Image (cartoon, rainbow, N blue to C red):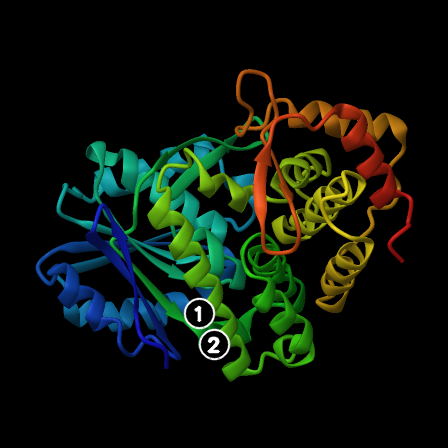
Amino acid sequence: MFNKIRINMNNRPIYDISFHNSFDYISEVIDVLNISDRRICIISDSNVEKYHMDTVRNALAPLCDKVYSFSFTAGEKQKNTHTIEDMYSYIIEHHFDRNDVIFALGGGVVGDMSGFLAATYLRGIRFVQLPTSLLAMVDSSIGGKTGIDFNGYKNMVGAFHMPSYVYINMDVLNTLPDREYISGFAEIIKHSIIKDKEYFNYLICNSDKALDRNLSIMAEIIYRSCQIKQSVVEEDPTEKGIRAHLNFGHTIGHAIEKYMNFSMLHGECVALGSIAALYISLKRNLITEEEYIAAVELFKAYRLPVNLYGINDSDIDKIIAITKSDKKADNNCIKFVLVNGIGNAFTDKTVTDEEMKEALKMITGGQNE
């Protein structure tokens, strides 16, 4: 298995990401954090709970003072203030103090909410990420972005709060439904488009094995995506500059996700948003037609959506209107991420509504078949 990745900030180690094929080595988390005498609350959702909660709870029980668990109904629609209130009530009732620890066992929703809980409870306690989805392993569990949705707007309330440890058990990928598994590849492809052309080509060559959940290929993919996320987060931990590049595909992607009332998975919407951003880049002569086609074909190779059907001009106008409330807006300007060639992202504040409309018409018109 790969060596740990250590996240540093200001030349100081902050936390490690470790890679395993089971939860058998979770004692390393207890040892590193020195929490054998502390209470732990495992936060999960109804989908993950039935597969992994007992395993993790039984592994942790002999290692620390007391293990509690809290689970909520799975889904993006639960990522709200009501669920967070229930979490606060639970750990308050069990007398958690500043030295106790939250363990986030789940995908992006669980990780974001658990991190927000940890960031705000008693003005901040430690938390550990145990990502169980591919998307969480390569993206949302790393970097300290935490938050909840508000009135349907993605991640509008949140905080930067770094995890104390990220423990990746790649074996749990075998329990993911195909649709959830495939969704994670949108963030992986995004990493290659914004940062690493060689990685982009690697993904082209290994799509079949990756979709078959080949462990050695997936270990390489997860590790390389984590390295890309590491390099960006270390340089810009609070998104003042280069970290914004990780939002590639997310401006339109988040708007589609909200407009579709979260009936589509996050990765599916990121794929569509990425293709829209690539199309705008193409129309601005920033990428070649060959690069655009190669990127669209890569999303298709990983069985991600490249078209959105049943959307008319009125719907497109509403999607564009949603982008104006995106958390990445700056002084009423949309901070849009484009690419100047595969592997070279940049932030642009001049993307117009007309450009977004043209890109949305392209992905809603079935032109990428």
**For residue 155, side relative to residue 352 (left or right):** left
Residue at image position (26%, 53%) is 8
Q: Position of residue 311 (x, y in %)?
A: 86, 37
At label 2, which amino acid type do we have? Ala
Q: Which mark is residue 1?
A: none
- Residue for badge 1: 223
Q: Position of residue 263 (x, y in %)?
A: 70, 45
Q: Position of residue 124 (x, y in %)?
A: 22, 37
Work out which residue is located at the far top of the displayed protein and give it. Answer: 331
In the picture, which quadrant includes the C terminus? Answer: bottom right
User: In the rendered image, is residue 361 in sight?
Assistant: yes
Question: Which quarter of the figure has residue 25?
Answer: bottom left
**For residue 157, side relative to residue 323 (left or right):** left
> Label 1 to label 2, Cα distance in Å?
6 Å
At label 1, which amino acid type do we have? Tyr
- Residue for badge 2: 219
Q: Are marks 1 and 2 in contact (CB under 8 Å)?
A: yes
Q: Decide which of 361, 112 is in the foreground and name it.
A: 361
Q: Secondary structure at mark 2?
A: helix
